[in-house]
Image (spheres, helix red, strand yellow):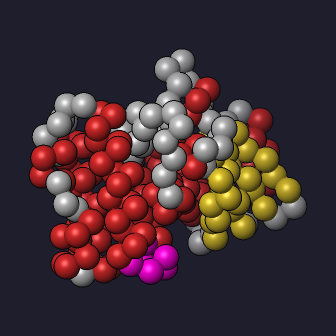
Amino acid sequence: MSSKTAGQIREFGGHIEEFAGKETAQKVMTGSEKIAKSSDKEKVALWVKEAIDRLDTAATAETCHRIMTACGHNCLARASGLANGIKNRRKKHATEEAFLAAEIKKPLKGIRLELQGKTLIHYYTPRSYSTPRRCFCGLMNTLPEGTNTSITYCHCSRGFVEKYWEGALGRPVKVEVVETCLGGAEECKFIIHL
């Protein structure tokens, strides 16, 4: 497995320990050393799904969401090209309204946007790629069709979307997860309260 995947798995475990304690981290991360060395991406995705199931039973929903949100924040920090790209696009527009209109008209590949009053609907469409996938995350993009995971995992994407739009708008936003591809939907839907 790539060092990136092994790093993501270690980071996941680190956030579990940070927010839920060492004992919970040990329970959830059972088998992580072996899976981090695997070159079978489907096996990795299935292990992550099982780890999320263990996390859901070992911690409160609020703690699970904090863990996965932290993972999403870190993911965007590593995706500096995306983060800087939207900040630079924002600078080209005199108003937030003009910026949002431009983003809606020409979103990045794999994203669809709608504005409804003071609410931005952010859709991820990973199945629209030339090589369709279940998720943009390298840990879960090969989760087999028909196998769904808890929405807990998708709070990672919620955290990513949150920091992405906060960086663009220069202020905090509240993001809700509505539905996700990993949960069986055709696309992921996030509501961003501007």
Q: Is 190 in front, or is 88?
A: 190
Give percent across and percent down for residue 180: 60, 49
Residue at image location 30% in from the left, 48% down from the top? 47
Q: Quadrant of residue 177?
A: bottom right
Residue at image location 49% in from the left, 20% down from the top? 131
Give percent across and percent down for residue 45: 35, 42
Q: Is 62 in front, or is 113?
A: 62
Residue lying furthest right: 117
Give percent across and percent down for residue 58: 35, 76
Residue at image location 29% in from the left, 38% down from the top? 43
Image quadrant occupied by the N terminus: top left
Instruction: Decide if residue 95 is on the left or right side of residue 146.
Output: right
Image quadrant occupied by the C terminus: bottom right
Residue at image location 33% in from the left, 34% down from the top? 42
Q: Is 174 in front, or is 130?
A: 130
The mark tally for this picture is 0
Give percent across and percent down for residue 32: 18, 54
Instruction: Decide if residue 179 is on the left or right side of residue 105.
Output: left
Q: Is residue 93 visible?
A: no
Q: Which residues are magenta?
A: 59-64
Q: Quadrant of residue 70?
A: bottom left
Q: Is residue 24 visible?
A: yes
Query: What is the chief secondary structure element of the magenta stretch?
Result: helix
Q: Is 91 in front, or is 71?
A: 71
Instruction: Decide if residue 32 is on the left or right side of residue 181.
Output: left
Q: Is 62 colored magenta in this rendering?
A: yes
Q: Is 40 colored magenta in this rendering?
A: no
